[in-house]
Image: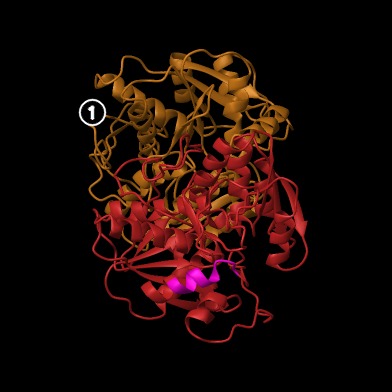
Chain colours: A red, B orange
Amino acid sequence: MLRAVCSVCGKERTRFSSEPNCECGGVLVPKIDFRYREGPYPVNYPYLERVVSLGEQNTPLLDAGSAKFKLDYFMPTFSYKDRGSKALISSLASMLPKGLEINEDSSGNAGASISAYGTSSGFKVNIFVPENTKPGKINQIKAYGADIHLVKGSRKDVADAAATHPGYYASHVLNPEFRDGMRQLSYEIFRQLDHRSPDRVFVPVSAGTLLLGMVAGFEHLLESGEIDFVPEIVGVQTDAVNPVCSAVNGVTYDKNNSKYSSADALASKEPILMEIMVGKLKKYGKCVTVNEDDIILARSELALKGMYVEYSSATVWAAYKKKHYGGENILVLTGNGLKTP
Amino acid sequence: MLRAVCSVCGKERTRFSSEPNCECGGVLVPKIDFRYREGPYPVNYPYLERVVSLGEQNTPLLDAGSAKFKLDYFMPTFSYKDRGSKALISSLASMLPKGLEINEDSSGNAGASISAYGTSSGFKVNIFVPENTKPGKINQIKAYGADIHLVKGSRKDVADAAATHPGYYASHVLNPEFRDGMRQLSYEIFRQLDHRSPDRVFVPVSAGTLLLGMVAGFEHLLESGEIDFVPEIVGVQTDAVNPVCSAVNGVTYDKNNSKYSSADALASKEPILMEIMVGKLKKYGKCVTVNEDDIILARSELALKGMYVEYSSATVWAAYKKKHYGGENILVLTGNGLKTP
């Protein structure tokens, strides 16, 4: 079992309970108490005895002139979420009985990923999605074998529906194993740059699993003496949904604003990992927002360079173009463009 | 320039002409007159000086119990066609002026691929597609920057429209460089199996670029002394469109049959590379057809194993299940399932 401590009461998790958060209501943060080692999965994931695989491998780092793009949609279910699902489902599969119902809420990509890894590992999977989820994403989730539950209301209502359904709440946000799988992204970047840090990494920010998992990976490399500094981290949100950027930048966020964003994967208006995200971004970087026009243009420009991504993924290119960033910049592209045609 | 000889008159191509086929009307077959060497692109493609890249890398070989699956949709434009486009566009980019119009006909995947590689290399790209092409595929082709031309009529009418458009006819079928890029698939399988041949490889068959390119790769490995035999090759077609299987099995093919197939990428009713394909399949293997029910079921079963593919790709699993095949079997999965939801 992954060692994890509560962000609120500081208590260490002692057992794999049916609720993935701490008894006090706080969230669990992975505790990485070993040195980084070079090697394939499950090296650097010592809590995993058996690792499930749907064919994941290192994703490409494409040098496209002014920036380098980490094509993190070269994945079995076509988004970076597979990094998290691989670690979470591997862990669950070794602790929980086959045939158990596992429940997950998602705006689309995490649902597809948990559906694929969960079902192929013998679980019965329920995925709860907002009712405005794109049909292509729903079809994909169903195809992997999960039952779909459309939920009216806010993103939080969707999460509540999943959390209260009978079975195990396999939340990709709360289960620390999911975030922990994201460390792999940092290791790949580190190795693809011949064992050093880039100057800066741009990531879209919503629930926080990518941001926090990636930061944990770089921190781990630093603590292990492998790199000299954690790269500057630029979190990116949209004009429509930006609670994290608002908190980082000290402005008020109106969660009832009616702005539309095509970046449908960036939907967390009240992220439960908020405080931890704000702390990490204040320590290592910043948070910038992009508007709808920026996003549409950015997606189109990336496609002309040969990278066909989701609108949510294009936000990092939109943010990168806003000012001159010197040094070596990595933009993480998270989701395949066929998901939102 | 790739050395290539005409399959009809036997003459060697002496120049890169505006028409990719031989002056006598025959098709050009690559002539591989060097030994296989271990190494990254452009090793084994000595005719390429500069190689364009959109982030391709070796695709996964997933061991799923009874068979191994080559996930050849882990590609920049999400289908195996990128192997061919990489070689063809790299070659064209070194021989033809930037800004030239290049024209291509496709039922979808090759169009997206040529659009992405062609546009990002500075060409103006026109893609001619059958009018029943799925909207998702059309959107993807357009996104990469090509102009779309919808053509009524047969698959051959689409090809004729592209061939007669001003500019260079960058046909993925006729240009030998495209087929030649497919050799890479065989090298990857060979290396992923620790430098040996599998017993059998299943591939969907339509225009023939995958089949012929892959066979050329295995033949090259054999001639270079790297393997002891060319694996048995099982070509797969559908009940609806099966001119190659009909010829291999000595039955009459009615190209005017009205059967529908969801395998929309397997649309070549009169493939120009027919005779060469039939020769290779008779020499190394066989050709089997699968019906619509088989295909629908196969796609669903693959998704439950975590592999979300096009109907056209699922044909190989449908074919594999028809009887007991002993030994080590590789099934090539060619296109991402998000393309045909």
Give the crowd class for mark 1: few <14, some 14-19, many >=20 residues within 10 Å: few
Q: Where does label 1 land, which residue? A: B33
In the image, the segment drawn in magenta is: A271-279
Above-or-below relation of A284 to B96: below
- Coordinates of residue A218 in the picture (x, y in percent): 35, 60
Which quadrant of the rendered structure holds the C terminus of chain A?
bottom right
* Side of A128 relative to B249 (left or right): right
In magenta stretch: residue A278? yes
Task: Kindly identify the amino acid type of the residue bearing the numbered disc 1.
Answer: Asp
- Does residue B338 appear anywhere in the picture? no
- Observer-nearest residue: B198 or B254? B198
Q: Residue at x 48, y 74 (%)?
A: A278
Instruction: Give the vertical position of B59 relative to A150 (above or below).
Output: above
Q: Is residue A73 above or below residue B205?
A: below
Residue at (60, 57) in percent of width and height:
A21
Query: Where's residue B200, x and y in %?
Result: 46, 19
Depth check: A137 or B105 in front?
Answer: A137
Give the structural element (helix, strand or loop) at label 1. Answer: loop
In-image side of A223 versus B341 (left or right): left
Chain containing the residue with disc 1: B
Total numbered badges shown on the rendered structure:
1
Residue B221 in the figure: left or right of residue B120: left
- Decide if residue A159 is in sight here: yes
- Taking the image as shown, residue B78 lies to the left or right of residue A109, namely left
Q: Is residue A195 magenta?
A: no
Please name the predominant secondary structure of the magenta segment in the image: helix
Between A144 and B150, the residue placed more toward the observer is: A144
Tell me where residue B190 appears, x and y as whole percent: 35, 26
